[in-house]
Amino acid sequence: MKTRMISINRAELDNASLEEAAAILRRGGLVAFPTETVYGLGANALDECAAAKIYAAKGRPSDNPLIAHIAKISDLQPLVSGIPEAGRRLMDAYWPGPLTMIFMKSSLVPYTTTGGLDTVAVRMPDDIIANRLIELAGIPVAAPSANTSGRPSPTTAGHVFQDMDGRIDMIVDGGPVEIGVESTIVDVTGDIPMLLRPGAVTVEMLRETAGRIEIDPAIEGPLKSGIRPKAPGMKYRHYAPNANLTLIEDENWDGGAISAKVVETIIRLASETAAKGQKAGIICTEETKALYPEAAVIRSLGHRNREETIAHSLFAALREFDSLDVDDIYSESFSGDNLGRAIMNRLTKAAGYHIMKV
Ligand code: AMP
Ligand code: MG
């Protein structure tokens, strides 16, 4: 299959090009497009064959459900069998935006889209290109992240091209995304809403709007055998570069500045990698980047207190290590509040929960 790439200028949306992309979606094809979180791989969420093509293009396990994206709040009703009060409050506060909610599904939504579940995940993105494309398509658009399953999510059209060239009909290039980590997922089907994946709508924000929020234990650490996460996707190794990634954390860390102990350990580990004749990569921040040896591939994600910048740079950095054939990556830790919870969730998963306490 030949993959077409079209560029869309956000300042002046070209409806004719977006209509071409919308027509592909309507006839059951695959179109990758930018959202404010990461690039999505879109297909008609109500068409079983179209949804099945997403799993094939990504190499995604068929029990890992897709998020249906809508253009306006009134598009939600046909997809669900009820809208609980907490869901109503959260969508009033955060839609359009980086918040996905899980509802009981209606019979309109095929099980291929929901990975066999009786629930459906729905989000209304804020990105102007995503919103216009979904509106023009006139259908809910299932759109998981547009990466090969297991690889870091794409934050530019170039990343999508690396993974999806020849596998999908079209890539809509709208430039780099705004946020850089996937949406927050909240299940609102129970009595108390439950966070299934942290994102840019933080737990702190959810609690302010909806009161009590439970947190799925699968977010915080590796799962004990036999326990299933509520978001099936959270059980797979994810967001991972080809290199071995290790997080280094001071056991007495208060979440503030990185200690000399962590820096020294990373320097030692990087030199051990080099001594084996292999390439080391280091993930750090502006505050520490000058402390590391130039022989390593050093990537600063930004200033430590600018969590938005860290989130925005993370997946691109992981992909870059791959393109530079790095063997071992050593990363500083990030504090786990607010957006930091999403950053640490992606990093610890990418590391396969390999955290070294020093
Ligand atoms: P992605 O779109 O690639 O960010 O992945 C979508 C995420 O949403 C995966 O982790 C899924 O497991 C999760 N998800 C989608 N639908 C549901 C659902 N009905 N219940 C729980 N989790 C869901
Ligand atoms: Mg994904």
Image (cartoon, helix red, strand yellow):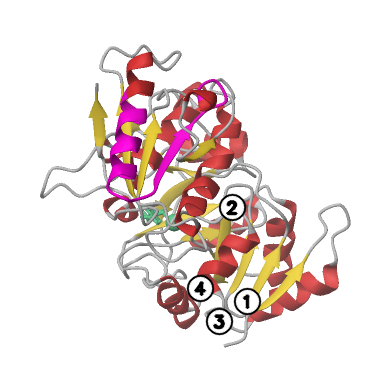
Q: Which mark is residue 214?
A: none
Mark with earlier residue (2, 1) = 1
Neighbours of disc 2 within 10 Å: few (<14), some (14-19), many (20+): many
Q: Amino acid at mark 3?
A: Gly
Where disc 4 sits, the SS reads: loop
Where disc 2 sits, the SS reads: loop
Q: Return the x and y of residue 175 as percentages of the image width and height.
A: 72, 55
Instruction: Report if the CB atoms under discs 4 and 3 are less than 8 Å apart.
Output: no
Q: CA distance from mark 3 to mark 2?
A: 19 Å
Quarter residue 14 falls in = bottom right
Mark with earlier residue (4, 3) = 4
Q: CA distance from mark 4 to mark 3?
A: 24 Å
Q: Amino acid at mark 2?
A: Thr
User: Where does the magenta region start and end?
Assistant: 265-288
Q: Amino acid at mark 4?
A: Leu
Neighbours of disc 1 within 10 Å: few (<14), some (14-19), many (20+): many
